[in-house]
Image (tube, coloured by chain):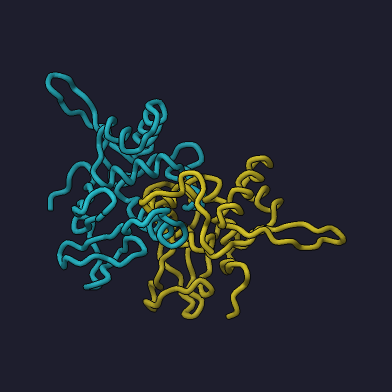
Chain colours: A cyan, B yellow
């Protein structure tokens, strides 16, 4: 799926177009958490500490831009909606990798917390510090999305598989 | 140089910290143009079409965050200042690469304009479409910053060398 251009998301420069769609604080944080499996309004709200009206606005814009798909589900007898990454939303992963690497190198955690790591499921090895990588530091193979696990030790020691784009691809 | 954390640029998640410093539309566009060699207020203003007060605010924040160095120069008898990338500002390059690749894949130029390309100076070959790469598509070697040229054909056919971080590294 291709994100429909909106606002400044047109023009000849691909960086300018990308910034017009995803170059915004809450949008990037929502994409990070969606990549880690968050799909529901209440979960984004509590994880991000974001005000209801801002979250509503950003989710609506992200659906319009083709980053998220709004998908119905039933809870008891009520129909509700959750937000799943599209191919364009899932395609932000290399941007998140680059942000993680920059954040590791150029900002400080402000507390002694172990760094985020990426585990390559087939070989079981974690990347060194410096953020996620496109290829495994250990075996050198490209890390496929469904073989990539993130360890965020300040939350949990358990590796987290990345959300797959909707509709779920067969493996 | 390490960007001094400000605002939300602390916490255990390196993506969250990076987003707190560089996850903003104008900041990313200023970093793009600074990477292409822009250093002066008036040049940023005319290239980006940004209001004076917003540009002043962003440049001041970026200096405070350690992304740009404010460096005096003389123009006639007046002392003025220009803005040069620090190591932290120059280190955003992989984020710009990832944004370019995402923009190429998931947004449309809206006009039939040739894509941005990266030329690897030592071997002289350009990357294919899909945005800048960390390694050369042709020779497979890592592309060093001072061997990386960007071609933005909607502006000029001439390859543009990337700005080096301040103070200039000896080659």
Could you tell me which residue is drawn at 24 percent across and 32 percent down? Answer: A82
Could you tell me which residue is drawn at 63 percent across and 44 percent down? Answer: B57
Of the pair B89 and B125, the residue shown nearer to us: B89
Look at the picture and state if A46 lies above or below B12.
Answer: above
Of the pair B42 and A149, the residue shown nearer to us: A149
Residue A15, how many percent across, how many down? 48, 52
Q: In this view, does B92 lie to the left or right of B164?
A: left
Of the pair B124 and A44, the residue shown nearer to us: A44
Is there any visible trace of residue A27 in the rendered image? yes
* Total numbered labels placed on residues in the image: 0
Q: In this view, does B19 lie to the left or right of B83?
A: left
Look at the picture and state if A64 lies above or below A25.
Answer: above
Q: In which quarter of the image is residue A112?
A: bottom left
Look at the picture and state if B85 lies above or below A26.
Answer: below
Residue A88, how many percent across, how many down? 32, 46
Residue B80, how many percent across, how many down? 77, 57
Look at the picture and state if B107 lies above or below A51.
Answer: below
């Amino acid at each position: 799926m291709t994100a429909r251009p909106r606002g400044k998301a047109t023009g000849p420069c691909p960086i300018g177009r990308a910034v017009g769609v995803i170059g915004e604080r809450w949008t990037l944080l929502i994409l990070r958490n969606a990549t880690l499996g968050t799909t529901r309004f209440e979960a984004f709200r509590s994880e991000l500490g974001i005000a209801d009206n801002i979250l509503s606005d950003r989710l609506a814009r992200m659906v319009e831009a083709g980053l998220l798909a709004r998908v119905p589900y039933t809870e008891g007898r009520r129909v509700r909606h959750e937000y799943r990454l599209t191919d364009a939303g899932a395609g932000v992963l290399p941007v998140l990798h680059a942000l993680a690497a920059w954040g590791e190198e150029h900002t400080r955690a402000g507390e002694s917390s172990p760094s985020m790591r990426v585990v390559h499921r087939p070989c079981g090895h974690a990347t060194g510090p410096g953020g996620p990588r496109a290829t495994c530091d250990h075996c050198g193979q490209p890390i496929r999305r469904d073989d990539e696990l993130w360890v965020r030790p300040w939350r949990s020691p358990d590796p987290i598989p990345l959300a797959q784009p909707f509709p779920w691809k067969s493996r």
